[in-house]
Image: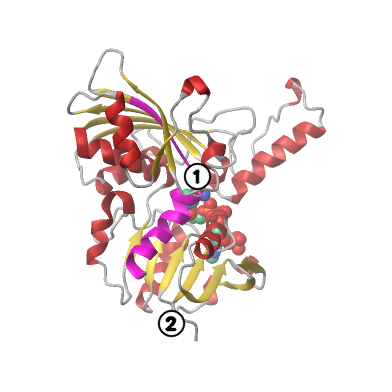
Amino acid sequence: MTEGWNVAVVGATGAVGREMLQILQERSFPVASLRAMASPRSAGKTLPFGDTEVEVEALSGADFDGVDIALFSAGSSVSEAHAPRAAKHGATVIDNTSAFRMDDDVPLVVPEVNAHVLDDVDTDGGSIIANPNCSTIQMVVALAPLQQKWGLERVVVSTYQSASGAGQAGVDQLVAELRDWAERGGGADDRPDRGGDAFEHPLAFDALPWIGSTDDSGFSTEELKMVHETRKIMEAPSLSVASHCVRVPAVRSHSESLTVDLQQPVDVDGAQRAFARAPGLRVHDSPADNEYPTSRLAEGNNETWVGRIRRDLENPETLHFWVVSDNLRKGAAWNSIQIAEQLFT
Ligand SMILES: NC(=O)c1ccc[n+]([C@@H]2O[C@H](COP(=O)([O-])OP(=O)(O)OC[C@H]3O[C@@H](n4cnc5c(N)ncnc54)[C@H](OP(=O)(O)O)[C@@H]3O)[C@@H](O)[C@H]2O)c1
């Protein structure tokens, strides 16, 4: 028998699940056996895993006996129905959905920020650990060094989130819109005029200031996740956070514009140094040379990129900057596998 851990990826055929399979390989994670699970639609399909292929099982009929680590990424309702079952059968569940994130007894983890909460996790099985929302993850990675050095007073963030944040269906809709547009002539008057499976409105050539559903507050669920998850991860229950989430026609990587009020005056050089020293962060900040983080720069790597760092013109305690990260990697698959590495390697 191969040494290592028995791993199950639930949602293995999805945008995040496929990335998980790739990262397990890239990191040479000690996998003794791998099971790929998805909906009954995908049962019997095969997925590449290194030099081999793994056959997809329908989650509904799958047991979790012998599974050490279950990486869940198939939507909240699927996690609610099946993650407790996996934990009961002895797996440690790392859940990428919103199902358990705000539960008091479930750690919500970004290893660069609050890895210490994993110290109490029993790796003999039965635990559920939550992976935060993609937009929250990259933001807290950038906020952590500011919190440590200057203290946080208020965070205002606007996101520019890619199509793949809505899964494979999001990418498919954007690509279909662009293909149709090209086939219809590719001119300014030929733009798509109808939404699709993933977005109510056409995403190509537009920006949609609405992600998720809402409650009476008027904020979207995506915006509220950024508020509540940030407070939990940063152990700052009264931190003031205002968020506006926008979908843009990038394929991969989310970008964020941040304005942060600190508790003390900040200077740009000091902020750059603090960002550069922080784990998981890369500074890319020379606008005069056209060097600033873009979606393409972040795509396919595990870093969170920061640039356009500037102090407010009036308030010396306020910093403005731009943060970009690959939502399928640091925002989802890589953060989950970092947690698994922390616990099991
Ligand atoms: N995309 C991101 O940037 C991102 C970031 C952070 C968190 N997340 C979360 O990660 C989860 C997956 O997102 P994604 O972007 O990978 O979505 P996706 O591309 O739509 O993939 C969804 C996956 O879930 C599986 N699935 C759907 N219904 C199922 C069922 N009833 N039983 C078993 N499997 C089922 C699908 O299987 P089939 O192929 O068989 O349909 C597919 O493998 C979501 O909860 C999402 O909120 C996504």
Which residue position holds label 1?
Answer: 326
- Residue extending furthest toward the top: 314
Query: Above or below — where is 44 with respect to 194?
Result: below
The label shown at residue 66 is 2
SS at mark 1?
loop
- Residue extending furthest toward the bottom: 1
Query: Above or below — where is 121 with respect to 14?
Result: below
Q: Is residue 192 left or right of residue 105?
A: right
SS at mark 2?
loop
Q: Which residues are magenta?
A: 320-344
Q: Is residue 295 left or right of residue 268?
A: right
Measure the alpha-carbon separation of dots 1 and 2. 32 Å
- The residue shown at (37%, 31%) is 157
Q: Position of residue 2 (x, y in %)?
A: 49, 82
Query: Above or below — where is 93 with respect to 237?
Result: below
From where the camera sits, is residue 11 visible? no
Query: Above or below — where is 69 with respect to 316?
Result: below
Q: Amino acid at mark 2?
A: Gly
